[in-house]
Amino acid sequence: MSILTILEDACNDIGLPVLSSIAQNDQTVKQLLRMANKEGHALINRYDWQRARKIITHTAVSATSQGNILAITSVTAASITGMSSPYGHIINDTIWDQTQQRPIYGPLTPQHWQGLTASSTTGPFSEYRIINNQLLTVPVPTAGNIWQFEIKSRFFCESSAGLGRDRWKNDGDLGRLDEELMTLGIVWRYRKLRAWITPRILWNTSVGLSTKWVKTVASLPWILEVATNIAHLSMSQMVVGT
């Protein structure tokens, strides 16, 4: 579903005139687009969605710095900000030296890292830390070894050609996350801005998000029940707060 269709659905739910393009020079359209970007960032950061996972392969170099993490995770699909990396963060405990079949431990705390770099002896397994976007390792790995790990992407949408983006740009841009959740979030943000929030809106948004997350990352029935209860509690607290 394109961003234009998402915003058309949101306009229908809110009761606004349906827009013809996200590039319209209209203050309401600009607000809706800004809310869509806010909702995209909120959703992508809230959970480790499977659509936000990416497997990275890296050829190790014989140096403490393995390079800039943005360059290591760079992809052809550039975002509209000009950055080609979808990098959000490394999923913990996923870096493995595939050549030696060894884990690369980390990320280290600043204290642990300083202790290792000050020591004259190191263990057999490389450990890492990211400082100023540099992927640093101790001890220095063997050059040419193949590393593989997973990252959490920050791209919540893509162009019609499949190029990842962290902002909506064109009418035909497609969502990488559930479009109905995106629509619910935009409607919630618009009505909240105008103090139109009702218990039903809170319930639909909270349950929709909770159940979608459970179906995406878990399959146990009891988790679904817990998520629904959390959504119900969240709604109750927000209603009381208003």
Image (cartoon, rainbow, N blue to C red):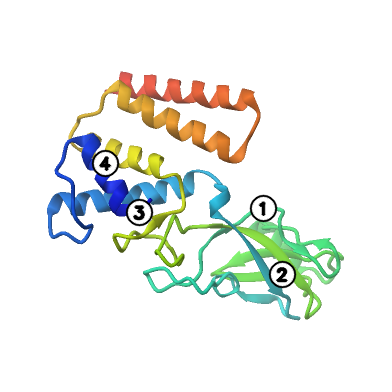
In x, y percent, where is residue 36? 31, 49
Please tell me whether mark 4 sits on a helix, a strand or a loop. helix
Tags 1 and 4 touching, CB below 8 Å: no
Closest to the camera, between mark 2 and mark 4, is 4
Question: What residue is shown with label 2?
Answer: 137
Q: Mark 3: which secondary structure?
A: loop
Question: Residue 160: horizontal and vertical position, in percent?
Answer: 40, 64
Q: CA distance from mark 3 to mark 1?
A: 33 Å
Going 34% across and 27% down the picture, which residue do you hit? 202
Q: Earlier in the sequence, mark 3 or mark 1?
A: 3
Asked if residue 46 lies left or right of residue 148, the reply is left
Q: Residue at x 71, y 65 (%)?
A: 148
Circle 2 SS class = strand
**Mark sitting on residue 2:** 3
Instruction: Choose top left, top right, bottom left or bottom right for residue 121.
Output: bottom right
First along the sequence among labels 2 and 3: 3
Q: Which residue is mark 1?
A: 92
Q: Can residue 209 be spotted in the picture?
A: yes
Q: Which is more N-terminal, label 4 or label 2?
A: 4
Residue 10: mark in rendering:
4
Image-based side of 168 in relation to 78, left or right? left
Spatial CA span between label 1 and label 2:
15 Å
**Quadrant of residue 60 in the image?**
bottom right
Q: Residue at x 40, y 51 (%)?
A: 41
Q: Earlier in the sequence, mark 4 or mark 3?
A: 3
Label 1, residues with CA under 10 Å away: few <14, some 14-19, many ≥20 = few
Residue 29 x %, y %? 18, 52
Choose mark 3 or mark 1, whichever is in front: 3
| Three-letter amino acid code of the residue under disc 3 | Ser
